[in-house]
């Protein structure tokens, strides 16, 4: 019988964004499968607070200046204790910078080194890249598109396993039988807050206001939609470096009365459940886990084909896909859904089925199988 596994989940981020939430989902579900987990994070970070709130075992480290030698030394001591206890150990780096500490901590030790790649752009080149990815026993790519980028940068395909992003269905703030009431309440709350008519189609998005998410194309598409359907309203939740440009463009396009910027919205499911149509206009996207949340919230989806989005959305099945950076096509897809309620309903029903394939228990099962296979391939007698 194989020895039990301990996974050190390492993330050096200061905030609590999508990647950190995905890591916490994975740690939670792996624990239910009998895999012990330690969240290794920056001391005082939002991730540390969230992990402690969820009762994870946490190893907070200073993580100051990559390659984080002091943090690696402290992590190495913890790894050795697990090995001495007869456990198999995985050091799983969830960010590219965290790989440095993971590799220093595990050098010369019989542990499994795993790198998670969540972003669509190519990794760096040179010695750092070769060390980070060349010494990994397993590289987990968020989507087929991310896998192809890794292969193009020289990572051996045999070491890469595609495991899509996910959501934790237990985080859904409604029971299935209570969804209609939750949606009514959400629409009422947002209608009051942003002075919206509740008897018309609402469209919107939850994105950072940055180039790769392309809010500018969304605004140009919205102008076309609003011109044809002046009763339609948009909600855009998010902040970022393009906020000033977005506000100026709203005024220039003359759609301020129909397009509402909410800033950071603390209850994303409340907004998603209130929307009829969710739009993701990204130019680059590792996968787009917000799409699964939108499916779970029963919003019909319009998205681009950027990066790993086609791993989550099949055009004409659980959403409509258009080329990135094309406001005309983005507008046409939204108009199609506004004018065809039956199509919206069919996409929503298919999305509800698809979200089950992308749930956190499925992600954990696939990850554990990938660990076991990598242990077999790496530590053959």
Image (tube, rainbow, N blue to C red):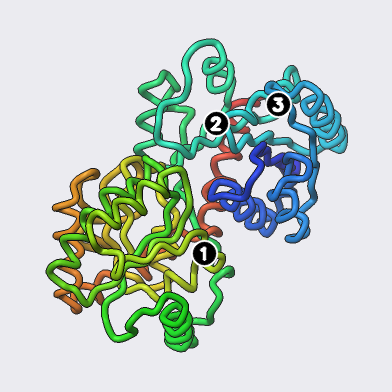
Q: Residue at x 35, y 44 (%)?
A: 308
Expressed as whole percent of the image width and height from the top left, the position of residue 122 reads 41, 26
Which type of secondary structure does the marked residue at label 3 adopt? helix
Disc 1: CA contacts within 10 A as few (<14), some (14-19) or many (>=20) = some
Between discs 2 and 1, the one toward the N terminus: 2
Disc 2: CA contacts within 10 A as few (<14), some (14-19) or many (>=20) = many
Q: CA distance from mark 3 to mark 2?
A: 17 Å
Between discs 3 and 2, the one toward the N terminus: 3
Question: In the rendered image, which residue does mark 2 sit on?
Answer: 138
Image quarter for residue 199? bottom left
Q: Is residue 298 above or below residue 25?
A: below
Residue 233 seen in this snapshot = yes
Q: Residue at x 66, y 57 (%)?
A: 28
Residue 350 seen in this snapshot = no
Expressed as whole percent of the image width and height from the top left, the position of residue 194 reads 42, 75
Q: Residue at x 52, y 59 (%)?
A: 264
78 sits to left or right of 194 = right
Which type of secondary structure does the marked residue at label 1 adopt? loop
Between discs 1 and 3, the one toward the N terminus: 3
Question: In the rendered image, which residue does mark 3 sit on?
Answer: 101
79 sits to left or right of 349 = right
100 sits to left or right of 84 = left
Image quarter for residue 41? top right
For discs 1 and 3, the disc positioned in front in the rendered view: 1
Q: Is residue 216 above or below residue 268?
A: above
Q: Residue at x 73, y 47 (%)?
A: 37
Q: CA distance from mark 2 to mark 1?
A: 36 Å
Question: In the rendered image, which residue does mark 1 sit on?
Answer: 265
**Nearer-the-camera pick, 306 or 30:** 306
């Amino acid at each position: 019988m194989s020895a039990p596994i301990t996974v050190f989940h390492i993330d050096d981020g200061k905030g609590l964004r999508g990647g950190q939430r995905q890591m916490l989902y994975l740690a939670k579900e792996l624990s239910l499968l009998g895999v012990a987990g330690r969240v290794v994070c920056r001391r005082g970070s939002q991730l540390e607070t969230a992990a402690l709130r969820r009762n994870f075992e946490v190893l907070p480290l200073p993580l100051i200046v990559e390659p984080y030698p002091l943090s690696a030394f402290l992590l190495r001591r913890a790894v050795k204790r697990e090995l001495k206890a007869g456990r198999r150990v995985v050091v799983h780096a969830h960010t590219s910078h965290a790989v440095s500490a993971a590799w220093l901590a595990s050098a010369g030790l019989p542990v499994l080194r795993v790198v998670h790649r969540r972003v669509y752009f190519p990794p760096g080149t040179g010695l750092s890249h070769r060390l980070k990815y060349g010494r990994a026993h397993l590289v987990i790519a968020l989507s087929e598109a991310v896998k192809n980028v890794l292969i193009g940068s020289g990572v051996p395909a045999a070491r890469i396993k595609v495991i899509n992003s996910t959501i934790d269905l237990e985080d859904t703030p409604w029971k299935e039988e209570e969804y209609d009431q939750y949606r009514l309440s959400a629409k009422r709350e947002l209608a009051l807050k942003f002075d919206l008519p509740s008897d018309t189609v609402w469209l919107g998005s939850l994105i950072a206001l940055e180039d790769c998410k392309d809010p500018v194309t969304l605004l140009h598409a919205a102008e076309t939609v609003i011109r044809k359907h002046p009763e339609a309203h948009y909600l855009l939740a998010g902040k970022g470096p393009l906020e000033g440009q977005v506000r100026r463009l709203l005024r220039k396009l003359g759609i301020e009365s129909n397009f509402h910027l909410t800033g950071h919205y603390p209850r994303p499911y409340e907004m998603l459940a209130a929307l009829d149509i969710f739009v993701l206009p990204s130019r680059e996207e590792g996968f787009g886990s917000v799409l699964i949340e939108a499916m779970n919230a029963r919003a019909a989806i319009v998205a681009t084909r950027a990066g790993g989005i086609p791993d989550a959305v099949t055009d004409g099945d659980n959403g409509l896909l258009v080329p990135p950076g094309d406001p005309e096509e983005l507008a046409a897809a939204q108009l199609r859904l506004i004018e065809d309620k039956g199509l919206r309903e069919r996409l929503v029903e298919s999305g509800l089925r698809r979200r089950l394939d992308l749930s956190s228990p499925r992600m954990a099962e696939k990850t554990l199988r990938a660990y076991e296979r990598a242990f077999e391939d790496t530590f053959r007698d």
